[in-house]
Image (spheres, rainbow, N blue to C red):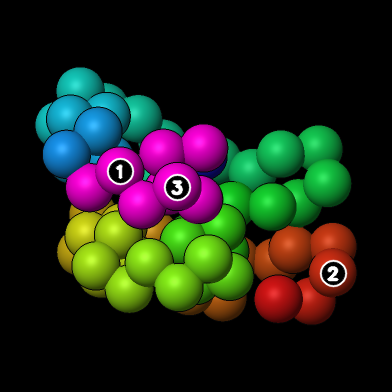
C-alpha cells in the first residue's frame, strides 16, 4: 500500500505481477486504490484498476 501512496509505479507493477491482492484492506479499511487516489497518483490508480481493484471497495471513512 505504501508503494501506491508514494506513486512507485514499477514497484506496484512488480507486486501485481507477483500475485499481490489488489483489494487487500488495512484494519482501518484503507486500500491501495484509495491511497493512490488520495495521493493523486492517477497512473498507479489506473494500474490497480486494470489489475482488478474494486472501485467500490468499502472503506471505513467512505472514500
- Location of residue 55 with respect to 22 vertically, above or below: below
x, y (%) of residue 24?
55, 40
Q: Say whether marks 2 and 3 touch (CB < 8 Å).
A: no
Asked if one can make out residue 49 in the rendered structure from this viewpoint, the answer is no
Residue 35 falls in image quadrant: bottom right
Q: Say whether marks 2 and 1 touch (CB < 8 Å).
A: no
Q: Which mark is residue 61?
A: 2
x, y (%) of residue 9?
22, 47
Q: Is 3 a magenta residue?
A: yes
Find disc 1 in the rendering and name its residue.
8
Q: Sequence-wise, which precedes: disc 2 or disc 1? A: 1
Instruction: Provide the major secondary structure of the magenta segment.
Output: helix
Q: Which residues are magenta?
A: 2-9
Asked if one can make out residue 20 in the rendered structure from this viewpoint, the answer is yes
Find disc 3 in the rendering and name its residue.
6
Q: Which mark lies nearer to you, 2 or 1?
A: 1
Q: Residue at x 76, y 51 (%)?
A: 29
Q: Residue at x 38, y 66 (%)?
A: 41
Q: Secondary structure at mark 2?
A: loop
Mark 2 to mark 1: distance in Å? Answer: 24 Å
Q: Which mark lies nearer to you, 2 or 3?
A: 3
Other-residue count near label 2 (Cα within 10 Å), few / some / many at <14 / 14–19 / ≥20: few
**Left or right of 56 in this view: 6:** left
Q: Is 19 a magenta residue?
A: no
Mark 2 to mark 3: distance in Å? Answer: 20 Å
**Left or right of 38 in this view: 26:** right
Q: Residue at x 45, y 73 (%)?
A: 40
**Left or right of 5 in this view: 14:** left
Q: Secondary structure at mark 1?
A: loop
Amino acid at each position: 500500500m505504501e508503494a501506491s501512496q508514494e506513486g512507485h509505479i514499477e514497484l506496484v507493477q512488480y507486486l501485481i505481477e507477483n500475485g499481490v491482492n489488489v483489494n487487500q484492506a488495512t484494519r482501518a479499511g484503507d486500500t491501495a486504490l484509495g491511497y493512490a487516489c488520495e495521493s493523486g497518483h492517477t497512473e498507479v490508480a489506473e494500474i490497480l484498476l486494470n489489475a482488478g481493484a474494486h472501485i467500490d471497495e468499502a472503506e471505513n471513512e467512505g472514500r
